[in-house]
Image (cartoon, helix red, strand yellow):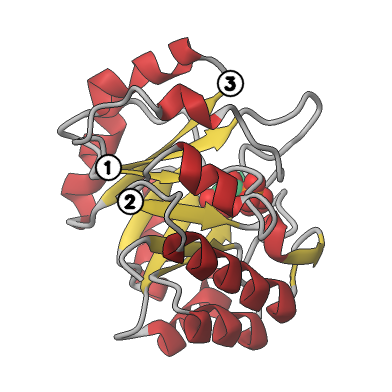
Amino acid sequence: MTLDVKICGLKTEDAMAAALDGGASHIGFIFFEKSPRHVEADTAASLRKAALGRAKAVAVTVNADDAGLDAIVSAVNPDILQLHGGESPERVAEVKARYGLPVMKAFAIREATDLERIGSYRGIADRFLFDAKPPKGSELPGGNGVSFDWQLLAGLDDNVDYMLSGGLNAANIGAALNAVSPRGIDISSGVESAPGEKDPELIRAFFAAVRLALETDTVPA
Ligand SMILES: O=C(O)c1ccccc1NCC(=O)[C@H](O)[C@H](O)COP(=O)(O)O
């Protein structure tokens, strides 16, 4: 599969196994205490061992300070840091320099103007992740299972390396990949049976739907 697939919010060995066996290129661990997907660093460190040589481990944080990131990086040894808060371009540059790791910067998208913000991160963030804006009242900046209008991304220039995220599932991934051509996709609640509870069957079904979508003529090259 040339398309990167990140399964995010993993907490258990069986979910990890389903993600890796399905062909995940990236597995994500959430370090955000309000999230039902939050894991302690030692749990993530133990889970990530199964991914060594198979998938990249992504540590997802929200406006984390140096002490928080130090603890995660030293325990988990992630391959990528995903910054999912309001981190400035300067902070992204600082994080990259401090850890020598690639950074994926997440942006919440609802309308075309939301994409204007990426300009000042180009050449700094290694990759973008475009997620939906959280619904009103949500305490989570991500993992809300809501989509945005994928057509908003259709005008991006081909050099913008991004993962498409937000409300993806087995039923809509074909349409999403028909609408836009991300280099990667990211999913969390679409493969859960309850908030924070990954379902290996749903993970398998998602990969089957991705493969089917990639095999059809409707997906742009
Ligand atoms: O998933 C969370 O609980 C979460 C909490 C705080 C910051 C980020 C979070 N998730 C980041 C992700 O990369 C999710 O995969 C992304 O938001 C898509 O989630 P979903 O819409 O549920 O597929």
| Image mark count | 3
Decide if ligand 1 comes within 8 Å of the CB at mark 1. no
Residue placed most toward the observer, 156 or 16 = 156
Q: Amino acid at mark 2?
A: Arg
Query: Which residue: 54% across, 15% down?
Result: 111
- The location of residue 169, given as percent across then percent down, is 66, 56
Judged left or right of residue 118, residue 130 is right
Say which mark, if any, is on residue 183. Answer: 2
Packing grade of label 3 (10 A; few <14, some 14-19, many >=20) is some
Q: Amino acid at mark 3?
A: Arg
Give the mark, 1 or 2, whose residue is nearer the N terminus. 1
Q: CA distance from mark 3 to mark 2?
A: 20 Å
- The location of residue 167, given as percent across then percent down, is 66, 45
Say which mark, if any, is on residue 161. Answer: 1
Residue placed most toward the observer, 203 or 16 = 203
Does residue 102 lie above or below 198 as drawn?
A: above
Question: Mark 3 highlights which residue?
Answer: 110
Asked if the residue under mark 2 is in contact with the one under mark 1, i.e. CB atoms within 8 Å, the reply is yes
Query: Which residue: 63% across, 78% down?
Result: 204
Query: Which residue: 24% across, 27% down?
Result: 157
Packing grade of label 2 (10 A; few <14, some 14-19, many >=20) is some
- The location of residue 217, given as percent across then percent down, is 42, 55
Q: Amino acid at mark 1?
A: Asp
Residue placed most toward the observer, 105 or 147 = 147
Q: Please identify, in this view, whether the residue under mark 3 or under mark 2 is nearer the observer.
A: 2
Does residue 60 lie above or below 53 as drawn?
A: above
Asked if the residue under mark 3 is in contact with the one under mark 1, i.e. CB atoms within 8 Å, the reply is no
Q: Secondary structure at mark 1?
A: loop
